[in-house]
Image: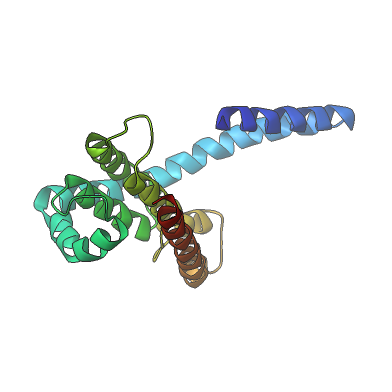
Amino acid sequence: MINKIWGIFILVGILFTLFFGEISSLNDTILTSASTGVNMVLELLPILVLWSGLMKIAEKSGVLENISRVFRPLLSKLFPSIRRDSKALGYITSNIVANALGLGSAATPFGLKAMEEMQKENQDKKQASDGMITFLVLNTSGVTIIPTTVIALRLMHGSANPEEIILPAILATLCSSVAGLTLDYFRRRKRK
């Protein structure tokens, strides 16, 4: 579905450009955007590799499991349908920690593993469980304490103060998390 939406955006942009006779502008944009995109990926790659590696070391050394134990009582309240000894809670914790550090790319593997574990425990394999829905809400709106990737992007593009995004990011993601989890709570109550 998202591919169709992006396809429509691109098509509308091309038609708009053709309608107003800005074909040379379209060519310039396509060529410079491709180059800018490749450069941005190459500049972000070391940051992503570093943090992904640190998260892997933390996972293998048991640090994430220790953090998981600390958060387990809170997560048990947020995810009442998941057993307290489930591996999914550990992966959920790892995902939350990575997202809190603004490392969406490093959080993705933990999120996928959490969903796989929850699917194993899911009674109805064709429908998402309550825990899966809650995790999706939390993962999408999760609180970001240090938006590492955004700070790196701002730094790459010459921002005078790339860290000034920290407080707005905390406030915005805190509000979105509270709103999302509140709606999810009422959805669960209504469903039962």
Q: Residue 20 in the image: x percent, y percent?
A: 89, 32
Residue 46 visible: no
Left-right relation of 18 to 106: right
Q: Residue at x 45, y 67 (%)?
A: 174
Q: Residue 156 in the image: x percent, y percent?
A: 51, 54
Residue 131 visible: yes
Q: Residue 180 in the image: x percent, y percent?
A: 47, 58
Which residue reaches farthest left?
61
Left-right relation of 184 to 122: right
Q: How many marks?
A: 0
Q: Which quarter of the image is occupied by the N terminus?
A: top right
Q: Residue at x 23, y 35 (%)?
A: 120
Q: Relative to 74, does residue 189 appear above or below in the rendering? A: above
Q: Relative to 39, does residue 188 appear above or below in the rendering? A: below
Q: Residue at x 84, y 32 (%)?
A: 22
Of the pair 98 and 113, the residue shown nearer to us: 113
